[in-house]
Amino acid sequence: MDTFAPGVTTAAVWTGGSGISLEKVDIPPLRDGETLVRVRLATICGSDLHTVTGRRPAPCPSVLGHEAVGDVIAVGPGASAERGQRIVWSVTVSCGECSRCRSGRTAKCTAVRKTGHEPFHGDWPLSGSYAEHIVLPRGTAVAVVPARMPDAVAAPAACATATVMATLEAAGPLSGKRVLIGGAGMLGLTAVAACLDAGAQVQVIDNHPDRLALATGFGALSSDGGPVDVAIDYTGSTDAVSGALARLDIGGVLVLAGSVLPGPTLGVDPETVVRRWLTITGVHNYEPRHLHEAVRFLDRTLDRHPWHRLVTDPVPLADLAAALRPPPTRTLRTAVAP
C-alpha cells in the first residue's frame, strides 16, 4: 500500500437544476482495492446535461462527471492501478461475484454503482469527475493512457468511445458491410471512425447540418436511403430507429444505444423480423474490455482524425454551472479542468 496522508479536496457538488456548489471534501483513507486519482481533465457527457435539465433522474446532491482522465496518486491494498499512471476508468463499478458478473455482464451487476451517479451524502462522496480528486472503488476497470495521447482525446474514452466499442461488438464483423449510423454527436462520430477502421462503408443521418459536415470530414457518406447491413442508433429517436429498421437488408442487424430515456413505442412487425432474418439488440454501458479497446482505437487513429478539436478548451470547476449546457456542434464535448 502507498503511504498517503488523507487531506482535503475541492468538488463541484450538483444541488439540483443548474445549481453547483464548490465544497471542500475530506479525502478518506483508502480501503482495499481503492484508488485515489487526481483528475486532470473531465468532459461533459450528454447524460449529465440530461440530469441537470431534469430529463434523467439522479441522486441529488452528488458529484457528477464520468468521462475523465487523471493521475493515480495513491492506491489501497489489491488495487489494479499503480501510482504515477495516467488512466481512464469505467462508468460502472461491479461486485464481480453475482450471476450477472459471472456471466460477463458486469455492466448490469445486481449491485452496480456508477461513477458520477452516486449520492454525495452516501458512503462514496468523491464518486464524480467534477472534482480535484476521485476515489475509485474495487471493481472499477482502469486503462492506462499512452503518453502521446492528449487528455482531451483520452477523457471521452471512459464513456463515449468505450460505448461505441460495445456497439460495434454487438453489430458483428463489419468488414465490407454497409453501415448506417444514426446521430453524429460524439458517439456517432466516433462510430463513423471506428466502422471505417473496421473496413465498413458508412452512411450517417443527423438533423444538424454542422454535425453532418463533421461526419463527412471523418469519412462518412451522406445517406442514400438504400438498404444497409447494419444500423447503429445513438439518437434515441423512435422515428429514426423505425427508419433504420426499415432499411435493413436480409440478415441485417439493428443495434440500439441511444434509447436511454422514455419515448414513443416502436412498432415492429414480427413477420418481417422472421422473414428478413433480422436481429435487433440493445447496448447499455460497456464491459472492461471495451474500455481498453477504446484507448487502443484512439491511439491507433490519433493522427488520422482531429479528435482534440471535438473538445473545448477546459474551464475551471468554478465555471461548471455555465458549462453544463449543450456545447457548440463542432465541439461535441465541453472540457473541465479541476
Image (cartoon, rainbow, N blue to C red):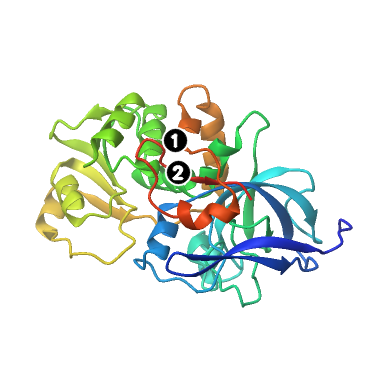
Q: Which residue is mark 1?
A: 310
Q: Which residue is mark 2?
A: 333
x 25%, y 51%: residue: 279
**For this view, does 299 lie left or right of residue 326?**
right
Looking at the rendered structure, the secondary structure element under dot 2 is loop
Foreground residue among 264 and 134: 134
Foreground residue among 92 and 333: 333
User: Can I make out residue 173 in this image?
Assistant: no
Q: Residue furthest top?
A: 303
Residue 234's disc number: none
Work out whether mark 2 precedes mark 1 in sequence or the reverse, and give the earlier one. Answer: 1
| Label 2 with label 1: CB-CB less than 8 Å | yes
Foreground residue among 246 and 31: 31
x 32%, y 31%: residue: 215
**Three-letter amino acid code of the residue under disc 1:** Leu
User: Can I make out residue 330 in this image?
Assistant: yes
**Three-letter amino acid code of the residue under disc 2:** Arg
x 30%, y 36%: residue: 211
On the image, which quarter does residue 135 sit in?
bottom right
Residue 33 vs 165, above or below: the answer is below
Looking at the rendered structure, the secondary structure element under dot 1 is helix
Q: CA distance from mark 2 to mark 1?
A: 6 Å
